[in-house]
């Protein structure tokens, strides 16, 4: 059979650079950036994976998030996945939502991704959503989010058309 070889470890308990408090989910972007859901520090940690003379190395590159429910805030993130499009999807478990981010041009920081149509994103990113390993409560929260977005879209359309229901087109 195949044998795994221990190559080293990165981090210790804490809240600073190179420290974690309940690292819960890991994803690797095509660029080699490693994203870690640091659950009890309410953040996503960004690490660089590189090959050095001593083998593979991880170095701290940045973080995203702080405790809360507003813009740039997370509460107990428990999963992270990178979609084929490059979108970074975070299961923000404590806030019962999925946050969509993208890597900035510097490859070190994460930026909130604008999502004009959540239903379209959901349809395109099903494999990434499955990779998150969402708990049933998170799935229900995502369904509610999608339903709310759908209601908002319908209400906006009705306002724009003066109350006339537009013909539904494909998503």
Image (spheres, grey):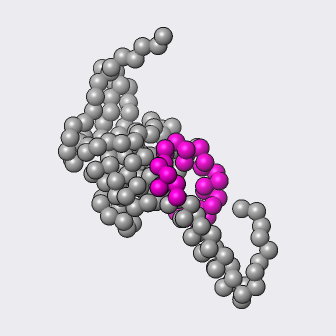
Instruction: Say which of 130 and 120 sits in front.
Output: 130
Name of the residue lying farthest toward the front: 136
Judge whether residue 46 can be spotted in this image: no
> Vertical placement of 89 versus 96: above or below?
above
The residue located at (39%, 48%) in the rendering is: 78
> Vertical placement of 9 versus 2: above or below?
below
Instruction: Say which of 106 and 17 sits in front.
Output: 17
The residue located at (36%, 65%) in the rendering is: 69
Instruction: Say which of 57 and 9 sits in front.
Output: 9
Q: Which percent across, then down, holds residue 34?
A: 40, 39
Stretch of the chain drawn in magenta: 112-140
The majority secondary structure of the magenta stretch comes to: helix
Q: Is residue 50 shown in magenta?
A: no
The residue located at (33%, 20%) in the rendering is: 6
Judge whether residue 162 can be spotted in this image: yes
Q: Which percent across, then down, holds residue 1?
A: 48, 10
34 sits to left or right of 16: right
Instruction: Say which of 153 and 109 sits in front.
Output: 153
Q: Which percent across, then down, holds residue 131?
A: 52, 42
Name of the residue lying farthest toward the right: 167
> Vertical placement of 10 versus 170: above or below?
above
Quarter of the image with the C terminus in it: bottom right
Dividing the picture into quadrants, the one containing residue 152 is bottom right
21 sits to left or right of 69: left
Dividing the picture into quadrants, the one containing residue 25 is top left
């Amino acid at each position: 059979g195949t044998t795994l070889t221990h190559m080293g470890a990165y981090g210790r308990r804490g809240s600073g650079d190179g420290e974690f408090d309940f690292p819960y989910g890991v994803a690797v972007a095509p660029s080699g950036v490693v994203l870690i859901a640091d659950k009890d520090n309410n953040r996503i940690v960004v690490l660089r994976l590189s090959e050095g003379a001593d083998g593979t190395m991880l170095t701290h590159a940045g973080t995203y998030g702080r405790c809360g429910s507003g813009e740039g805030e997370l509460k107990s993130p428990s999963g992270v996945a990178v979609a084929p499009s490059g979108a970074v999807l975070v299961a923000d478990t404590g806030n019962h939502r999925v946050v969509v981010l993208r890597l900035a041009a510097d490859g070190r920081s994460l930026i909130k991704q604008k999502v004009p149509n959540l239903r379209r994103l959901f349809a395109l990113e099903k494999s990434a959503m499955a990779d998150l390993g969402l708990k049933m409560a998170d799935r229900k929260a995502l369904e509610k989010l999608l339903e709310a977005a759908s209601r908002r879209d319908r209400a906006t359309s009705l306002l724009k058309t003066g109350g006339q229901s537009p013909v539904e087109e494909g998503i």
